[in-house]
Amino acid sequence: MAKKKTPAEGAKKTNHPNVMGLHAEVLEQPITETLEVNYMPYAMSVIVSRAIPEIDGFKPSHRKLLYTMYDMGLLTKARTKSANVVGATMKLNPHGDAAIYDTMVRLSRGYGALLHPFVDSKGNFGKVYSRDMAWAASRYTEVKLDTICGELFRDIDQDTVDFVDNYDGKLKEPALLPTTFPNVLVSANQGIAVGMASNLCGFNLGEVCDTTIAFLKNPDHDILSTLKAPDLPTGGELIYDAAALGEIYRTGRGSFKVRAKWRYLKSENLIEVYEIPYSTTSEAIMDKVSELVKAGKIKEIADMRDETDLTGLKLAIDLKRGTDPDKLMSKLFRMTPLMDSQSCNFNVLIAGMPRVMGVREILEEWTAWRADSVRRRVYFNMKKKQDKLHLLQGLRRILLDIDRAIQIIRETEEDAEVVPNLMIGFGIDQVQAEYVADIRLRNINKEYILKRTQEVDSLEAEIEDLQATVNDPKRIRKIIIGELTEVRKKYAVPRRTDILYEYEAENAQGEEDDTPDYPVHLFLSREGYLKKITPQSLRMASDQKYKEGDGPFLYWEGNNRDELLVFTDRQQCYKTRLSEFDDSKASVLGDYLPTKLGMDGEERVLWACIPGDYSGQLLFCFENGKTARVELSAYQTQTRRKKLTGAYSDKSPLVTAFLLREELELALYSSDGRCMVFHTAVLAPKTTRTTQGVNVMALKPKRTVTQVLPLAETAIVNAARYRARSLPVAGAILREEDRGEKQLSLLE
């Protein structure tokens, strides 16, 4: 066995901190110096060069990828393997292939994270609404630039933007992309830097172009009037809050709410969710619903599954028998990410400095930057034409004496002396002389030179026009407006996110369940006083007290949880719940509805009803003899709206209304003493609340309908005399013998 060697005496000792038994030297350094030397350079690099988008709407990683694809000709060529693009991009972006491919996925059409994707993809790129759906490796997918990228690179070779060295100084790349539209507002973008972050939501391209055009024409333009609200790639319904959106538009910070879209399949007793908020995923929603079901907080769901396929997102929720889908979805919106908040932080790099800006400030910066790009392009074209004009002016001088030019060239002994001799002979500069000297022998004729020099006048006019454009901001703005109009025409698409303008969050389910459920009696007076009395209280005292000059008008039996619809003389319908009224007694006046419901000044109550399950129809009778039959469901809303405008037609004053659960006969009385009777079955129901209805009673000029009563509540003896056989009819004069004995009722 070999003997273990021992270190030779006097051998050099190792002094390395990583060797066991040795310790590194501890150096003391002021914290300010540590921050300045070690921390700040990293922080600034992340802020300026990685995480925060610039005025063109891109981070450096996005810009490097897209420019590489443009340089590869993928704007017009067929798709290529994603791996090829990733490899080529590493010449500009040294952060590794995984990071580059992740960037490509987010920009792709298949992933669906952008309203207008920049990468036309083929293959599995995952989905933005799925947390767990992995995309395929880059060797399996194919990409090219989408057609809209033509607007990102338009005239990039005409000095519209600056080009800078790449990380190793061997290549050039654009500092910004010359986008012809405010992509910074169109493409959603998020980034987390050091000590700050950025979260830009997307807006509809058509609305952004319209807003930018209006802003260029009038800097004081009302942004909210054209830029309605954010538009998200995953769709959904945006809960419109003018105050919140105004704050976002003004400061660049804030949040708005988006909820999922769903439909109820009655035949299968299930709910399908097919669009969800941009800020969540289908897995997060299902996890939360599962948690609530296990905790016993949601008992209406039998099963929930993800049925997402090639057609798109679909979450199926099986309901237990007897479940109200509207109430269940209201609960899910409140308790799960099916309704979520989208935060906004419009932090954008401007000249290397991060700035949180509102929409108006962003438009100011973008239009100024775009105006500079257009001005540079116009100047570039003008300079090219000036150079061409300069050459043609030299040609025109030679036209005067072609033979002399040939003689100078022929008699010059050395090649290097040809250009100086032409300069001396014709009084032209070196550039012009070089151009003349390079003309082919066959082109040294008067015809060729005349044709070329004829362009001088037109070039001079074009140069003058271009110079005027460079010096005139109005003409620059006109060019930008023209480009925006073209972009809107070619690429604008309808909104994906619907706007829900009137929405009120429903009460917590616990509060709703705690609402007492008991029968009540309702009494409404002619002047609008409402009393809610329990059966026990009514038995103790049934004589109703009214204000002097007031009296009974309407009476119902209902439940404390029922809704109440109140119609006014301003064609408005106020919706409230009976539980919002305190239990009253017969000896008090009750609640004054105009005050309780917050009606407009001098607005009067005309009629009211308890809709129940919103089955049946409402019958509106007007003074002009017309009667409108409207489906009661037209007044049903999924949200807790307290006021509906346009509740009925405004063409004529309303006499009265009826809640039709079944057909009946009505008697109409006119101001000239006539009466007519008709059956409600002849009227077809309408879904439009403001329908003018059907002319039932033909009236003479200045005559009106004064009263409408169910035939069963009248004392008419000979109803056949007044019954209509066709509509409209004038009716018959009501005879004294047909009036019958006047009967007193609760309504008198």
Image (spheres, grey):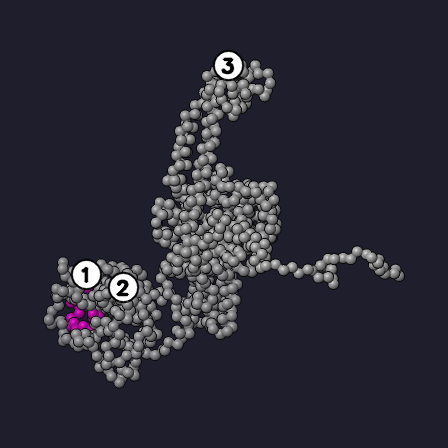
At label 1, the amino acid type is Asn
Find disc 2 in the rendering and name its residue: 572
Residue 725 colored in magenta in the image: yes
Q: Tell whether label 3 touches label 1 (CB within 8 Å).
A: no
According to the image, label 3 marks what residue?
403
Quadrant, the C terminus: bottom left
Dot 1 or dot 3, earlier in sequence: 3
Using the numbered discs, state the Cα–Cα distance from disc 1 to disc 3 in whole angstroms: 101 Å
Q: What residue is shown at x 74% (from left), y 57% (from top)?
A: 15
Disc 1 is placed on an element classified as: loop
Question: Does 173 sit above or below residue 691?
Answer: above
Q: Which residues are magenta?
A: 709-728
Locate residue 583: give its quadrant: bottom left
Image quadrant in which you'd find residue 663: bottom left
Q: Which residue matches tag 1?
A: 624
Which of discs 3 and 2 lies nearer the camera? The answer is 3
Q: On the rendered structure, is 520 left or right of 652? A: right
Q: Disc 1 to disc 2, how far (Cα)? A: 19 Å
Which mark is drawn over residue 519?
none
Classify mark 2: residues with Cα within 10 Å, few (<14), some (14-19) or many (20+): some
Q: CA distance from mark 3 to mark 2?
A: 95 Å
Magenta stretch: includes residue 148 = no
> Secondary structure of the magenta portion, mostly?
loop
**Count of numbered tags:** 3
Report the amino acid beneath label 2: Gln
